[in-house]
Amino acid sequence: GWLDPGEADKVARFAEVPDLSYLVLTSVDRDDLPDLGSGHIAGVIRALKAKREFLLVEALVPDFQGREDCVEEVVESGLDVFAHNLETVERLHRRVRDVRARYRQSLDVLAFALKAKPGLITKSSLMLGLGETHQEIRDAMAALRGAGVEVLTLGQYLQPTRNHLSVQRWVSPEEFNRYREVGLEMGFMEVAA
């Protein structure tokens, strides 16, 4: 697949924005590349850090098919937050996620990132409103915490097109607040719900 060899330098220009203190990089799956895109992501992070060492960089990455060498490549790039989204509860995982994604593999990727670089902040996210039960949400939160994840975001699923899964329910702001409290009790450093 095609990659822009100048992308790292182009993205690194954002490090020059005076008031920017936190930057989030996102990536699509690059299963077409031998290193699944991990080298490219790491290169962008290194370029950002070379321009501005104290800029906080979060990378929201794919699961790299569970390959630890790819996770380690990104983790060792100097990033501050390693993010990979679990997306949904275990029962709905096969229906909601791409067929190549696996629930346990996502948890293993997050756990390995922390093992490869102790002290690294790891982050994940769950979409709510797809038909999951309260207990399934709590179980997924506990599984993420068990993998060492420290920051969790919970958000309402919105159907992007008619071809996507429909919204099964709207989660109330009060319920999101309760999940935030549950997450903090579980030991998450932060829960944005």
Image (spheres, grey):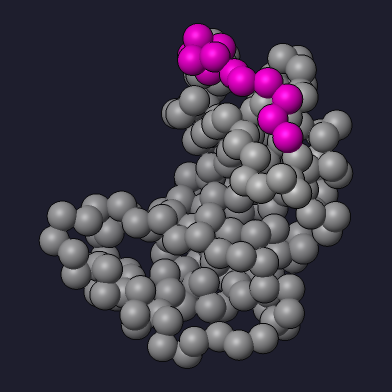
What's the residue at 75%, 40% (across, down)? 165
Is any part of residue 186 visible from this angle? Answer: no
Name the outermost residue toward the front: 162
Residue visible at 71% across and 45% down?
Answer: 162
* Residue closest to the eye, 171 or 138: 171
Q: In the figure, 126 relative to 41: above or below?
A: above
Q: Is residue 113 above or below residue 17?
A: above
- Asked if 119 appears above or below 73 in the picture, the reply is above
Among all residues in the image, which is located at the extreme left?
A: 18
Residue 192 seen by the camera: yes
In this rendering, would 175 be left or right of 70? left
The answer to whether 174 appears left or right of 70 in the picture is: left
Counting from the top left corner in percent of width and height, residue 36 is at: 68, 74
Relative to 156, say whether 1 is above or below.
below
Q: Give the range drawn in magenta.
A: 166-177
What's the residue at 73%, 79% (across, down)? 32
Q: Where is residue 90 in the image (x, y as percent from the top left)?
A: 81, 34
Q: What is the x, y in percent for residue 133?
A: 76, 17
In the picture, measured across the screen, residue 84 lies left or right of residue 57, that is right
Q: Tag count in the figure?
A: 0
Q: Which residue is rendered at x = 42% and y = 81% of the image?
A: 7
Q: Quadrant of residue 145?
A: top right
Does the stretch in magenta take in 113?
Answer: no
**Left/right of residue 110 with respect to residue 57 in the rendered view:** right
Residue 80: x and y, percent? 41, 54
Question: Where does the N terminus fall, quadrant-wise?
Answer: bottom right
